[in-house]
Image (cartoon, helix red, strand yellow):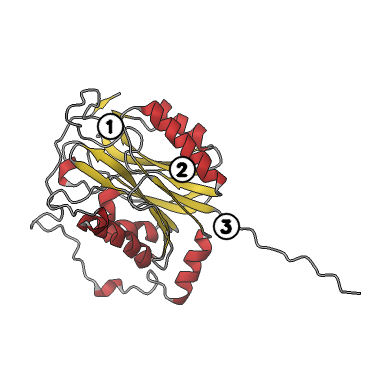
Amino acid sequence: MSAMRSPVSRRPLPPAIAAVAAPAGRALEPAFADMALTLARARARGASLVVFPECALGGYPGKVPGYEENPASPPLIRLDGPEIAQLVRLAGPTVVCVGFSEEAPGGPYSSAVCLNGDGVLGHHRKVHLPPGEIGIYEPGAGFAAFDTPVGRLGMLICYDKVFPESARALADDGAEIIACMAAWPVCRVDPARRLARDRQTLHFDLIDRTRAIENQVVWVSANQTGTLGDLRFLGHAKVVDPEGRVLAHTGSRPGVASARIDARGAVAASRAVLSHLGDRRPGAYGARAAVSPAVPLFTETPIASPVLAPA
């Protein structure tokens, strides 16, 4: 008589984290409908965090030639307005990060909100403005992480991630996950024939992996796709682990990059061997954080600067 086998206990799968690559237009109701569909599909794949691109709600500033119904100015949205309340209802149990153009005193701002069905969890205003956005938006004032059901999280918007200090400030504030939302186009000066070989695609992908490694965090990178006038957004949404491994990516087409990962466990495991935060020697670096008046870091042709107006 054969012995009975004891049932094998299986560990529950960790939740998934999803990064979205998608176009964004001016009309809000179609955007809400698209987000609802994306969220439903991501939740069906186990996602507890979904990150949408910069300006996902209302689109990026810029006018499409020949299309008068597509104004240059995105609608301005208040953090306490009905649009954010609608996002809260859509989010339900899922933690969601979304970029939008914010109406607020001292603004407008290119902003991002993190929320779920309980309300707003965190808020960020883009600090680093490329030349094409100066005169359209005002810069934000800093970086802060915040607690969410999926872990301690920080947000960056597009050009913010070029500056190592941005992600480091969030890591220093305890961020285990950094969600970076972008409307990052291909090179406007000398675009490559193949998007995958474009220098801006190279920069975008390298920065994503580098910031994850530097700070030993889970990096969630969302980006727009499609075109806006002469801008062609390159997509390449991805989820990167603290070792710099790309766990999921979309390529240049619209889609959702989804990967199951225990963010807190992955961060702890990475830092247990070498702690890039703990092993720093600040006294050796000196106080050299002054802004250089030399040639700007971003030198591509700026876009036209429409004036934003409330919806």
Does 81 appear above or below 38? above
Three-letter amino acid code of the residue under disc 3: Pro
Instruction: Assign a secondary structure to mark 2.
Output: strand
Label of residue 96 in the image: 2
Q: Position of residue 193 (x, y in %)?
A: 19, 53
Residue at image position (28%, 25%) is 310
Q: Is residue 227 left or right of residue 150?
A: left
Q: Quadrant of residue 64?
A: top left
Label of residue 105 in the image: 1
Residue at image position (32%, 42%) is 54
Q: Position of residue 68 (x, y in %)?
A: 20, 23
Label of residue 14 in the image: 3
Choose between 280 and 29: the one closer to the eye.
29
Q: Is residue 239 left or right of residue 118?
A: left
Instruction: Assign a secondary structure to mark 3.
Output: loop
- What whole-number distance in Å separates the C-alpha atoms at marks 1 and 3? 41 Å
Q: Is residue 27 left or right of residue 242?
A: left
Q: Position of residue 109 (x, y in %)?
A: 27, 37
Choose between 137 and 71: the one closer to the eye.
71
Residue 285 shows in the view:
yes
Instruction: Assign a secondary structure to mark 1.
Output: loop
